[in-house]
Amino acid sequence: MQHRVETELTIPSHIKRLWITRSALSGALLAAFVLAGAMTGRTCLAQAQLPSRPPGLAPLPKVTSPRLYVIDCGTLVYNRPEDYQLTREQVADTNMSVPCFLVIHPKGILLFDTGLSDRLVGRPLWENVDEGYGQIRFNTLRGALADIGVTSADITYLAISHSHWDHVGNANDYAGSTWLTQKAERDFMFGPGADKAHLPLYDALAHAKQVVFEGDHDVFGDGTVILKFTPGHTPGHQALYVKLVHTGGVVLSGDLYHYCEERPLRRMPKEEEATGTPGSREMMERFLKEKNAQLWIGHCTAFFKNAIKSPGWYD
Ligand SMILES: [Zn+2]
Ligand SMILES: [Zn+2]
């Protein structure tokens, strides 16, 4: 989404209650597992020594080359493409998909973007409007990861394309991972100009282990997974390049583009014309050509509809 004039985030009181209830429930489940472990005696010690891995979870996928998962992290209901300098006639679908991406690499696991908050699941649309965007979530990121066989404890690195609320909805859940961030975005998130209304969505990252950089960052050091510095939409916006053995090169756009039509029609939010987006887009076009890579525009519903969704994958 495009960042518009900041409005105060009002979290309906029942959402807080729902969350607390869920936490209490998982606490009770955990206590039940510990008790069950204690009762079986023999397995108790082994369980205590292992990182908590819920029983019945699929085994962690083992890979010899990178594998990319496209996860449904919600939908934004929106009807003002004019904010992106497009008319309704020019846009096939004015709504936006919100994907999260998981990369399983032989050397570790990277989560790229965390989507809309898991707390929105089951809530009616009218409660979940933020800056004019209705938010829908049918699943949770945690649940989608569990379907793959991954828990938050398995995730080596968290990276976000940028800090807008539709990309950091569950960031706090992954603050135990190492956060890979552009210096400019971290400063934007925690500096004096921070979006205070949405800071609670990601404030735990302030205490996460961090790798801070300026420019591109080769995540696993072998050129197969690279964060591409693409400032403009926000000061430290980054896209993600993934080199896959069978699929070839793929770039996950973040909000370098929103609607699919922005690319052929060369449109962008008016204010981004002066903040670096044109230069970042030019750089990206050169990079795509050089790598013979595809560009996947996350908010473009035509991309998302046709994508293989997790627990399926690309490799
Ligand atoms: Zn967005
Ligand atoms: Zn954005």
Image: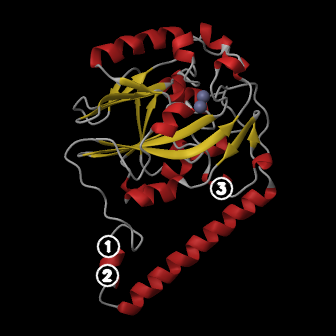
Q: On the image, numbered disc 3 is attached to which residue?
A: 121
Residue 114 seen from this side = yes
Q: Quadrant of ligand 2?
A: top right
Q: Secondary structure at mark 2?
A: helix
Which residue is depicted at the point 40% across and 13% down? 285
Between marks 3 and 2, how big is the CA–CA gap?
A: 36 Å
| Amino acid on which disc 2 is placed | Leu
Q: Position of residue 165 (x, y in %)?
A: 63, 37
Q: Position of residue 49 (x, y in %)?
A: 32, 73
Give residue 28's quadrant in the image: bottom right
Residue 232 seen from this side = no
Which residue is depicted at the point 42% across and 48% down? 177
Q: Nearer the viewer, residue 14 or 207?
A: 14
- Tags 1 and 2 touching, CB below 8 Å: yes
Instruction: State the quadrant of the N terminus.
Output: top right
Instruction: Identify whether 193 is placed above or below 34.
Output: above
Give residue 58's quadrant in the image: bottom left
Instruction: Identify whether 227 is placed above or below 280.
Output: below
Q: On the image, numbered disc 2 is attached to which residue?
A: 45
Which mark is drawn over residue 49? Answer: 1
The first of marks 1 and 3 along the sequence is 1
| Amino acid on which disc 3 is placed | Val
